[in-house]
Image (tube, coloured by chain):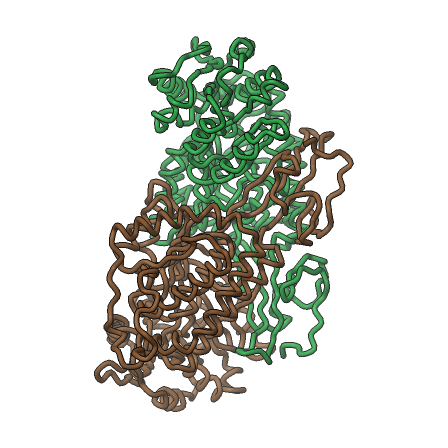
Chain colours: A green, B brown
Amino acid sequence: MAQAHPDVLPHSEALTADWSTASVPDTDAAELEGILSSAAGAAGPLRDTDSAARAGALRSVADALDGAADELVAIAMVETSLAEQRLVGEVARTTGQLRMFADGLDEGSWMDIIIDTARPASTPPRPDLRRFQRALGPVLVFTASNFPFAFSVAGGDVASALAAGCPVVVKVHPGHPQTSDRSAAVVIEALATAGMPDGCLALIHGQEAGVTALRDPRIAAASFTGSEVGGRALFDIATSRDVPIPFFAEMGSLNPVFVSSGAVAARGDSIASDYVASFLLGLGQFCTKPGLLFLPRDHGLTDRLVDAVRGVAPGRLLMDRIHDGHRTGRDALASRPGVRTLVQGDLDGRTAGGTLLLTDVATLCSDPADLLTECFGPTSILVEYDDLNEALAAARLFPGCLTATVHAEAGEDFGTQLLDELSDRAGRLVWNGWPTGVAVSWAMHHGGPYPATTTPEHTSVGMTAIRRFLRPVCYQDCPQELLPDVLRDANTSGIPRRIDGRLSTDDITRADPVPT
Amino acid sequence: MAQAHPDVLPHSEALTADWSTASVPDTDAAELEGILSSAAGAAGPLRDTDSAARAGALRSVADALDGAADELVAIAMVETSLAEQRLVGEVARTTGQLRMFADGLDEGSWMDIIIDTARPASTPPRPDLRRFQRALGPVLVFTASNFPFAFSVAGGDVASALAAGCPVVVKVHPGHPQTSDRSAAVVIEALATAGMPDGCLALIHGQEAGVTALRDPRIAAASFTGSEVGGRALFDIATSRDVPIPFFAEMGSLNPVFVSSGAVAARGDSIASDYVASFLLGLGQFCTKPGLLFLPRDHGLTDRLVDAVRGVAPGRLLMDRIHDGHRTGRDALASRPGVRTLVQGDLDGRTAGGTLLLTDVATLCSDPADLLTECFGPTSILVEYDDLNEALAAARLFPGCLTATVHAEAGEDFGTQLLDELSDRAGRLVWNGWPTGVAVSWAMHHGGPYPATTTPEHTSVGMTAIRRFLRPVCYQDCPQELLPDVLRDANTSGIPRRIDGRLSTDDITRADPVPT
């Protein structure tokens, strides 16, 4: 548990110790009981904190993480084999994300305040109804392998749950336990200094502790970022509890990219090199990695694609388990009938390079279950199509995806028709761009139909990720002094509220006030 | 299936035929396949209808149902044993609900439009992101026994799904098959006349057809109103599919009412008579029926309560199954140690009268699993408490409820503390009122933690019920002409949109437009 390892190893050792094999002991039953009990105890006090105080706390956490960035990045480099520049950027993304949630808390719309004033003369008489969203309770977050900061101890799931006012128990990913422990020490101290209640964040290590926590009645919701197999197993546990809980799993995606003939003619070379840069970014260890590139059969870009893949240096993947999983998945794809290997990535020792496979739509249509399987890591498939109808037929094969991308030129039917088809299957539609890089903003939707996620209506990135950890409570005919501040007639915080069906930041003036 | 029985029996027979035993054949496999295929076929066309057209269609359905109200009420009276006045009111509530969704569609906030304009100079550069909510796909609705109109073929689930742009397959409740078939004929004709695509509404009869449909990959979400046992069984099916789907079950509630000493002193008599009127409204066949009334031990209201219960005429419950279930549930409660029967309802033949049981908090605390079991029908329990701490201890026993009610006077701690405790357990908190009667409006929340519902974040009544049947789609850097109208720069419909974090009905003026 995090509190037991506030300063596991001093910074000076971070660069020499073999962090990747220095394991952290699994959380035992007694520690877990203490953590769950503390989280349950923190639920009321944290829920009742002023949202401005929580916003301040999130900003303090962001500042503290920025201050500890050098140390955290050094640990993460050893544990994850990710490059320094990438990790520095990821810390900045993580602290920017915390500040976004703080700003969102201040803006206030997250409470989704809806007020219908009384209409005693209507048939039947309508009472005064005032509704807002409030914290759901303790949240269990299963963190990701591939983002030791942005989807980890201070990542989007944790930030959105804390913003909502929910205590968080973090099940640490085994790929970066020391980074997680050290991050937690920073975060917990910042939260405490900012006046947040004890127990609003704690870490657990080990699969058994994670599953036990997921089954515990004190946990009100859980989130997960990782593989379909892992996410589904945990979803099944969450939904089969005596009291089922919402389980928000983001389980990766195939992220197809469809390129028209017009786009190839206009900018084929840059499409080829940008595609390779996107699928080999971070050695393909992104849930938004483009897994399949659809090109017209006469594209003429094979040599350029092969050269570009060969031009990216091999590297070490996040973990041995991921390395082995990538090799197995890549070899399974490469061995399917009708699939050719254009470039075989270097797999000496622990390093992996880019692999580019080639097939066509006819093969894909004959073998969709095997070929439409995500291969996490530096492998992608070039798929050749004959015409628009074949491209559309291929699009219809896809299960739910986080993203789908179309490259086309103005006036081509291709773009309109593919976008329409893909809009049934993806959460985010990218036009003439690439799916890697997920902006952290209000409008982002990082989600999609199953198996991209278990909850197609929710995102795990962006301000609206907070909605996962809230539920409505409606007050009927309640006197002003017993209402939460934000539901009273006077709108002292200037929060947008829906009053009698219309959005407004005004106070409520009632001719016939509810008696108190 | 509905289309096969457009005019099952003419109106003249409605009052003489034994509707309650005139069964409708179960939907067979071939019919079901046709219905699911039509629903899947309608998904794209219905999703793509203009929301103003759908609003018009909902209003046409409302007008048609109002026009057919006499006939529908006559059939429902025989099938459900509910009184004419109640059913006339329920049709009005149902058509009012359809018009509310129509008005909500026109207002536009349901699309939850969020636009973040491009920030090419930021690190990393932010693309143009435009998100809205769109239809999830075909929805399966399991209708309720106790509302042959408002939670049935044209009820809230169906209205909100159609408003969202989702085709609906209705699994008819066996308690009112003829009412359902006749309603469907009216609704389907009105939808067709309003230009809605074929297949956007169909009925199925029979449990096997319902379960088969729930397992079908063409169904994208399902809703249910009924018992905890039934709802949980269907939830388990929905979540264990290869592709799990959202399952929105509203499964009833205990709806406790807590009354302070001050309230008893100030208005004990009216509390007693209003409580009895609320729990015996419709012979207790409401999911918001107050199942337990907590009174201070020295309340002195027993005689008045007993007289009030005896003053309500016994009547016939909705179905034999419900009659038998009520008797079994009531007898189980009455036979628990420490429970006394104050009034035993008449149970001659097929009629049931009000039953009032008596116990105290100590008994409740020693036997919560047995005593905190909903008894659907005309039974409620009076529970005596000694002091505020006992009342709070009792409140903490409750599982998730749709509602919880507090009666107290200004200045009493009782109200503040009970409201706070109950806010963790209920979707709607009623002050000095009664939970029966669920206003259909923007702010209503008819939901709550499990087992009140399977999805604590959603309501099945009120405008926001539409959110169950939508999912976000986000367009990244998409040219204006390929965007849905409502996401383009010009806000021709005047819909509220969140632009760069702020709510606005303005057009977007961009210095650096996305190239098209």
- Seen at 33% across and 56% down, the residue is B232
Q: Which sits in the foreground, A367 or B461?
A: A367
Q: What is the quadrant of the C terminus of chain B in the image?
A: top right
- A279 shown above or below A127: above
- Seen at 66% across and 33% down, the residue is B127
Q: Which sits in the foreground, B230 or A144?
A: B230
Residue A427 seen by the camera: yes
Left/right placement of residue A392 relative to residue A336 reads right
Residue A187 lies in quadrant: top right
Left/right placement of residue A14 relative to residue B447 reads right
Q: What is the quadrant of the N terminus of chain B in the image?
A: bottom left
- Seen at 48% across and 47% down, the residue is B45
Q: Position of residue A469 (x, y in %)?
A: 52, 49
Q: Which sits in the foreground, A215 or B204?
A: B204
Q: Which sits in the foreground, A294 or B331?
A: A294
Q: Position of residue B452 (x, y in %)?
A: 41, 62
Q: Position of residue A458 (x, y in %)?
A: 51, 45
- A151 shown above or below A79: below
Residue B388 seen by the camera: no
Report the label total.
0
- B321 shown above or below A113: below
Q: Position of residue B434 (x, y in %)?
A: 48, 76
- Seen at 52% across and 52% down, the residue is A42
